[in-house]
Image: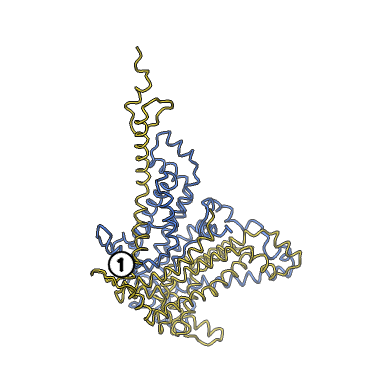
Amino acid sequence: MTQTAPPPVRKAPAVRARKSGDTPAERSVRTVISPLALAGRRGKVAYWSVFALVVLLFAFAFLFPVYWMVTGAMKPPEEVVRTPPTLVPEQWRLSGYTDAWELMRLPTHLWNTVVQATGAWVLQIVFCTAAAYSLSKLKPAFGNVILGGILATLMVPVQALVVPKYLTIADMPLIHVNLLNEPLAIWLPAVANAFNLYLLKRFFDQIPRDVLEAAEIDGAGRLRTLWSIVLPLSRPVLGVVSIFALVAVWQDFLWPLMVFSDTEKQPISVALVQLSQNVPLTVLIGAMVIASIPMVLMFLLFQRHIIAGISAGGTKG
Amino acid sequence: MKTTSRPAAPARPRSAGTTPPPGDARPAGRGRREALRRKIADQATAYGFLIGGLLCFILFSWYPAIRSVIIAFQKYTPGSDPEWVGTANFTRVFQDPEFTAAWRNTLTFTALALVIGFAIPFVLALVLNELRHAKAFFRVVVYLPVMIPPVVSALLWKWFYDPGAGLANEVLGFLHLPASNWTNGADTALVSLVAVATWANMGGTVLIYLAALQGIPGELYEAAELDGASVWQRVRHVTIPQTRFIILMLMLLQVIATMQVFTEPFVITGGGPENSTVTVLYLIYKYAFLYNDFGGASALSVMLLLVLSAFSALYLRLTRTD
């Protein structure tokens, strides 16, 4: 269910709204309960009880599973399957992680994932930006028809097309090349991302024509204009697209499961599932933690942008 | 004699692409040819920028969409020539007992996800919106499961549900409730998977609701309160109508997403027990990669495609701004 289309960030300026949307704590917004009702003694007691309850709920529902994973990998194999379970490992050991690293050949699979995600990201940025720039500013003949066709693909759920897409990758039309087990099998289909292309196009549409014409009069070619004028202005939207692109590849499962039958080439998500039957539980848990670290790290680093990007989709209505 | 001052003279060696000065009295034919050449050059540049992306769309969106319909009517196994078989693929998959199970499970999964996976994020967002402290903390923590790779979430819950080493029954025991079969019981497996999907995906929904709730003008609540509306009535008559559009959008998105569920049943239950968690997408995968029957898989894909496209079309229609 990673394929959930992110809700449309309708207008590009929604990205700009980040600043104001991100600090609601400072604004005093009137909500269902009035500030007056909270000011009284009873109100305060009720508020802090609810607050404590929510904190506990969040800790149990969202933080505890992560804690359980991280510590589970540190327990000795016999302790992790014991009932009742121990909340804190009796013996702390790192062998769950080190064994996972070696037994499940995590460096290979992590590297595969990095290669797949980076390539998909680079190709998506290059081709989608160029195409969006062309559709937005260069006005190719039949541009509107092409844009319509691209937007129509938003209606076609990605997962429902995996079978013919697999056949296309297995035998590329006209050139008859087999891309199975090649990173290109991830990279090329990733470019056909109507959502990201549309996001970029909408953003480019808002760059005034005068700016581009001024550059042209100064003797800049189309590529030069794109590189030195359009791209620097589009930094926020490029950031959003980059995050979407990287997360999508890192989280995907069905498509890499189909196109990488060669164990050596599989990304971490596929390898985890394929190897999960044959390794001790602590090793599997260790591998699960390691597989999550890059995404969680990225989230913690860019959480402001990610959360603002998601919230922006909801501000319209 | 100043022959060079004749207007036509400097125009001669003009290279393609330069703008003719106004009032230039050149023969009309050359001007038109010049303009045409420029137009072609402009179009070539425009398509040069477009071509890479366009090719990818042709190869991986449009062509597969058409091809899935074609293969649905063919006997297709890679390596041998396709053969037209009419509607034989459809009749074959219709007769497969797994077909009914897969659609029933998918629809039940979607319905359950709407009930469980929909009410919880809304209520959660409603409560979070009232809290005035640690807002950033809540928003980060609720989104944390979304960033954990779905495969890891699935494996994590498989471990929780484990009848021996799992935590789920421990929690039930702690609450003095009877142990459950979770994913090992044909009647509980699907619900257990919905719980996983809800846990893993609700972060995004909560954040979107939070943003929507913050857009509701406070005066509406004030007015309702002055009219004597209780807290519940304020939610019922102010909050819900004000967020109706977002609720509808997210419902549609959720239907589209949950009908394509694959990772959870594949990783946690393998479709079992007794086909109780086989979904349509899982069945498509089985047809293609276990039975090597791409015709049958395509027939199934076309059916899924038709159903989902109807929802997508509705979604796009409702969200269209221009």
B214 left or right of A189 in image: right
Query: Where does residue B43 sit, x and y in percent of width and height?
Result: 37, 43
Total residue callouts: 1
Question: What type is the residue that disc 1 sits on?
Answer: Phe
Q: Is residue A102 above or below residue A236?
A: below
Report the front residue among A139 and B143.
Answer: A139
What is the quadrant of residue B133 in the picture? bottom right
According to the picture, the residue beneath numbered tag 1 turns out to be A260
Query: Where does residue B65 sit, x and y in percent of width and height?
Result: 37, 63
The N terminus of chain B appears in which quarter of the rendering?
A: top left
Residue drawn at (25%, 60%) of the image: A177
A192 left or right of B144 in image: left
Binning the other alpha carbons within 10 Å of mark 1 as few (below 14), some (14 to 19) or many (20 upward) gives many
Which color was chain B given? yellow
Which color was chain A given? blue
What is the quadrant of residue B218 in the picture? bottom right
Query: Where does residue B18 sit, x and y in percent of width and height?
Result: 37, 32
Query: Where does residue A143 sit, x and y in percent of width and height?
Result: 41, 49
Report the front residue among A54 and B262.
Answer: B262
